[in-house]
Image (cartoon, rainbow, N blue to C red):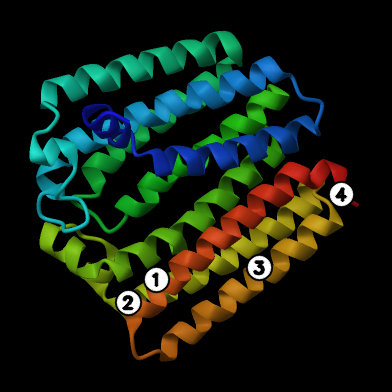
Amino acid sequence: MNGLLKKYYELTKPGIIYGNLLTAGAGFLFGSKWHVNFWHFISLLIGMSLVIGSACVFNNYIDREIDNKMSRTKKRALVTKDIAAKNAIVYGTVLGLIGLIILIFGTNLIVLVVGAVAFFDYVVLYGYYKRRSIYGTLVGSISGASPILAGYTAATDRLDREALILFLIMIFWQMPHFYAIAMSRFEDYKAAGLPVLPVRQGMKITKKHIFVYIIAFILAIVSLKLYGGASDSFLAVMLVLSLVWLFKSYKGFNVANDQKWARNMFLFSLIVILGLSIMLAFDPLLP
């Protein structure tokens, strides 16, 4: 890939896009019960990719001064000025408009609203609160939970109890995931002056939050079985993964190296979300 094209590609944070498409696709297949309208499915994936990519471009633009203070992000194209700020704004705007148009004509109004709200939350609300409050992570989790909601509503054309439970599952998964990131990259966040929970209230308090959110995640998983029609197979697999995750969280209260433990928690959270997405996607086919 051409060097400059690669930098524009990376400006969209492709890792975030792919992760969100995984949950969006899982939500769609769960909601459609494999009676797939391929036009809606492809439109969902392409439209959401562009909207998410647009939000990430604008987030890069807003955070360029913060990124310059963090070792992980100081080589991003807007920090190094390999891409001009005005070019990034045009790029992000074009991506977002095309993405919303695809969602309008390829899915339904609910998905369009979900996508627009997620964009506003990530770019505006999260962009504001991440600099000012320990609750910035919670605010940002709304946009992260939106793709699975968009996928489900693209398939069902409705907001219902299952949609709410899926949304909450993703909220409760994200909080331990992002707190683990904040702990493992403590020095970066401290250097950037961001008021994430480990920096403001310490590692012990953050571990307690992680433990509580994993319990909430487990309760939401059980709720999807009890009130959302998920299969016994889904419940069994997800309970095993969730309880292992909870046990790892509990062990964290007695570790010597908090950052090493946090990195392991982060990696295991990726296994959890992969397992969740696979089980949701194939749930209509399972006993």
User: Residue 144: x percent and y percent?
Assistant: 45, 43
Of labels 3 and 1, earlier in sequence is 3
Left or right: 78 as drawn, with respect to 32: left
Name the one closer to the observer, 254 or 56. Answer: 56
> Disc 2, disc 1: CB below 8 Å?
yes
Count neighbours of disc 4 (C-alpha within 10 A) and say few if under 14, some if 14 to 19, many if 20 or more: few
The amino acid marked with disc number 3 is: Leu
Which residue, given by chain and number where applicable, does mark 1 sit on? 263
User: Residue 100: x percent and y percent?
Assistant: 45, 16
Image point (51%, 13%), residue name: 102
Under tag 1, what secondary structure? helix
Of the 4 image quadrants, the one containing the N terminus is top left
Residue 147, visible in the rendered structure: yes
Q: CA distance from mark 2 to mark 4?
A: 38 Å
Which residue, given by chain and number where applicable, does mark 4 sit on? 286
Q: Which mark is residue 259?
A: 2
Left or right: 127 as drawn, with respect to 163: left
